[in-house]
Amino acid sequence: MKTQTQTYGELVNEGPAKFPNVDQAYARLWQTQGVKRFEFFLFQGDAVFQVLVGPMDSAKMADFDQIMSTLDAK
């Protein structure tokens, strides 16, 4: 994650996040031309899942929240 060169605009904020059923999670908030997106890194055992979701003001964010609550990264 520290060596990642991919960006999605200006990094607005980053830090630990909470997700069910994963060992650890980390989030970054990106902004490009007023559009905000979340980038999540989910850690489970030796696996790392990267998830990019946005725009933040989309009505579909509720769908994303529901999907993530059912995640079972075994």
Image (cartoon, helix red, strand yellow):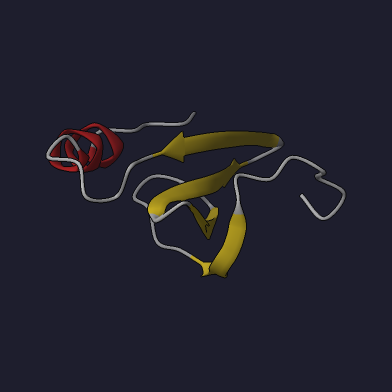
Residue at 32%, 43% in the rendered image: 55
- Point out residue 44 in the picture as x, y percentages from the top left corner: 58, 41
Residue at 24%, 33% in the rendered image: 70
Location of residue 12 with respect to 46 vertically, above or below: below
7 or 63, which is in the foreground?
7
Q: Is residue 22 left or right of residue 20?
A: right
Residue at 43%, 48% in the rendered image: 37
Residue at 46%, 31% in the rendered image: 73
Count of marks overlaid on the render:
0
Location of residue 40 with respect to 26 vertically, above or below: above
26 or 53, which is in the foreground?
53
Q: Is residue 55 left or right of residue 17?
A: left
Q: Is residue 64 left or right of residue 6?
A: left
- Point out residue 23 in the picture as x, y percentages from the top left corner: 53, 52
| Residue that extends furthest to the right in the rendered view of this protein | 3
- Point out residue 65 in the picture as x, y percentages from the top left corner: 22, 43
23 or 25, which is in the foreground?
25
| Residue that extends furthest to the front in the rendered view of this protein | 33
- Point out residue 53 in the picture as x, y percentages from the top left corner: 40, 38
